[in-house]
Image (spheres, coloured by chain):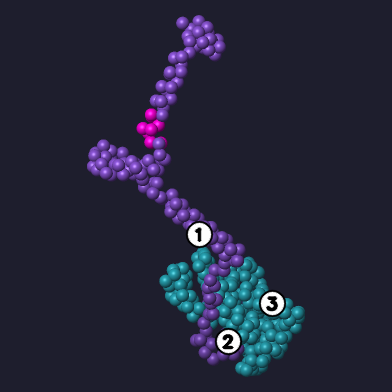
Chain colours: A purple, B cyan
Amino acid sequence: MNNRKNINEELETIAPLLKDISRQPVQTVPEGYFEQFSVQLPKTAAPVMSMSQVRKWMGYAAAALVAGILVTAGFIFTDSDVQRFNYEQYSRIDVTAEMNKLSDDELQSYLATATVLSGAGHTSSAVSEEINETITAETASLNQVSDEALEQFISEHTGNSNLK
Amino acid sequence: MEDVEIVAAFKKAATKERAFTFLVKKYQEKLYWHIRRLLPAHEDANDVLQNIFIKVWNGLESFREDSRLYTWLYRIATNESLSFLEQQKKKAAVDFDQLGETYSNSVRADENFDANRLEWKLQLAIRQLPDKQKLVFNLRYFDEMSYDEMSSILDTSAGALKASYHHAAKKIEEFIKNH
């Protein structure tokens, strides 16, 4: 900043009357104005979120909630006994040894129950007997047919008469 | 605290408010009188001063230290004051001469006004000048700035400012001699 001497020298040449006038302010200022002066800074406003943004975030929240429910339900239903079934454990069971531990009464009781459940006359032994009887009856009826009739039958069905 | 230190302290969160308070205390009176010489009413000058410091608070963070804080503050104060004057003119829908008369009346309305004192005659003479010329005269005569400093505030060449100041000083002297 230039000092007053330089300015006054300048004024001396252009407007000497101004050189000697006091530069002190003359206007009235309220008492204690400068001592009490403080700047009223605007308070920092909270960031304003538009309604469209609010709706967007609410949409995301709802989507997240639904996804959470679906994932949780998926775990509940798929993480069932089927997945926990331990095939390896059952493959290690010695069936013969386990059967030997059973008493005759227990076995008879099981067989009686199994017969009831599958229907009378449908146990595996009964089925075998039925099959054997059918085969025996068919063999006996075939023995009664002559060789010529058999050859004719084969010829008619295969087109080959020279079977021998 | 030097201006460079004020700016550096303001840019740190921990010392920002303290630096700003120091800046306000250091410059409030100089800036107030700079405004008040352009706007005669204290209330107007106070409003403009508040706005200036709010702008300083918002802008000092990005203040480039290749210019001086002192001239930067005066630049804001000058622009704010001129904007205020423009608004006043538009609001009042009066031309410059009418507004100059209004301002002269407000000078006379001051409770300390004494028509015989040179200081008051000087105030009345300054009120007759166009805004820009008034500004140049005030910065040189009261704030004792060099033409280079004024040039950085007003974006006008030092030569043009010198011519404007000389012209204003002669008009003021003439006014005082005639009143």
Residue displayed at 57% across by 65% down = A54
In the rendered image, residue B117 lying in the magenta stretch gets the answer: no
Which stretch appears magenta? A122-129
Q: Quadrant of residue B128?
A: bottom right
Could you tell me the amino acid type at mark 1?
Answer: Leu
Q: Rounded to the nearest whole Å, what is the CA distance between mark 2 and mark 3? A: 26 Å
Q: Position of residue B149 (x, y in %)?
A: 57, 70
Instruction: Please name the residue that numbered disc 1 is placed on.
Output: A65
Q: Is B39 on the left or on the right of A60, as rendered? A: right
Q: Both on one chain, marks 3 and 1?
A: no
In the rendered image, residue A124 lying in the magenta stretch gets the answer: yes
Q: Is A112 on the left or on the right of B131, as rendered? A: left
Which chain is home to disc 3?
A: B
Q: Rounded to the nearest whole Å, what is the CA distance between mark 3 and mark 1? A: 56 Å
Q: Position of residue B11 (x, y in %)?
A: 46, 68
Instruction: Please name the residue that numbered disc 2 is placed on.
Output: A25
Which chain is home to disc 1?
A: A
Along the line of sight, which residue is nearer the eye, B48 or A22?
B48
Q: Residues within 10 Å of mark 3 (few under 14, many from 20)?
A: few
